[in-house]
Image: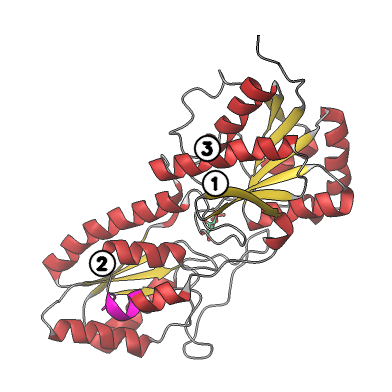
Amino acid sequence: MPLRLTGVRVGVLTGGGDCPGLNAVIRAVVRKAERHYNDEIVGILDAWDGVRKRNTMPLSVDRMRGSLPRGGTLLGTRRGSPFDTETGVDEVIASFAELGLDGLIVVGGNGSLSVACRLHAEHGLPIVGVPKTIDNDIVGTEATFGFDTAVQIATDAIDRLHTTAESHDRVLVVEVMGRHSGWIATYAGIAGGATVALIPEIHYDIDEVCERLIMRHERGRLASIVVVAEGTEPPPGSVETPDKVYDEFGHVRLGGVSQLIARQIEERTGYETRVVNLGHVQRGGTPTASDRILSTRYGLAAIDAVHDRAWGDMVVLRCTEIERAPMAIAAGRTRPVDMKLYREISDLFFA
Ligand code: F6P
């Protein structure tokens, strides 16, 4: 008879924007928790709102069946932080006791990990983090799940756009997600054979972009794809841009830079130009095999971290190994694109 460990009671929540692979993380946590540690897993609905309101559901291996290929999150997600309201943090602390949680796994992006980090550091709550975002911009890990899926979706879209661009001799400007970092734009630009990829890390130079397009035209290639990350900006003062609009959580509402760039291209080159904004399509649907594997490995490592009482840590990918790093290194920062890779690709392939 194998030894049955005495289990603990662990909460799991998903916070911030959703991303393909969240259900795979939860499934892996539940499977190892139930089968290996004899734990009880409490699913917390709608991120921190659910903690405060004690809105939960029991999770079991049976309940998770069929969840591996499903996009989104069966727990629901919200943006927002308990630190935003006067009573939020006290409510979270009270819920921990009321729900009898021995630990909490927070699967989130920069925002959720920052909140988790503060709740642990300032209030001693036993929390372990799992980094997630399609943007792939979390400091401390070499990859976040959801990114590979987003790149695949954007690449498939670019493949399709090549043929219609060629039929009409048009420039197509494709806007992809990437608030602070241009990982999706860079990777989808490489994989999709784009002419240019513009990223938030560098103010774009519209004259250089147009020069590349003209050079290509002069070589006989009349259709081009320009990939633009949504957070890309023109050099300050170079062009009049509309006032920034913020959402209720203080994030700038992005989307629209590609319209400006298309207009600039058409005015300067005379080439007919169209815009395609891929938007939330990049976050929807089933995760790629690679994302399912990374999510599963993160989930298994997260429940191990709970049992090691590695509070304040998150699980991370380093080379091919899943390791741990303090959530504090990710809080309030973003990981920029590897500029060596970007410049090499930009010089040799884009254009
Ligand atoms: O989760 C990251 C992200 O997908 C960013 O790339 C994008 O700017 C943002 O979320 C969009 O957020 P929302 O779903 O709230 O519009």
Q: Is 348 colored magenta in this rendering?
A: yes
Which of discs 2 and 1 lies nearer the camera? The answer is 2
* Front one among 346 and 220: 346
**Is disc 3 placed on a helix, strand or loop?**
helix
Q: Are marks 3 and 1 in contact (CB under 8 Å)?
A: no
Using the numbered discs, state the Cα–Cα distance from disc 2 to disc 3 in whole angstroms. 31 Å
Q: From the image, which quarter does the C terminus lie in?
A: bottom left
Q: Secondary structure at mark 1?
A: loop
Identify the residue position indicated by label 1 in the image. 18
Q: Amino acid at mark 1?
A: Asp
Asked whether residue 131 appears in the rendered view, the answer is no
Residue displayed at 52% across by 35% down: 24
* Badge number at residue 328: none
Residue 154 lies in quadrant? bottom left
Which residues make up the magenta segment?
Answer: 345-351
* Residue where numbered disc 2 is placed: 193
Q: Position of residue 6 (x, y in %)?
A: 77, 20
Q: Which mark is residue 296?
A: 3
Task: Determine if the C-beta at disc 2 is less than 8 A from ligand 1.
Answer: no
Determine if the C-beta at disc 1 is less than 8 A from ligand 1.
Answer: yes
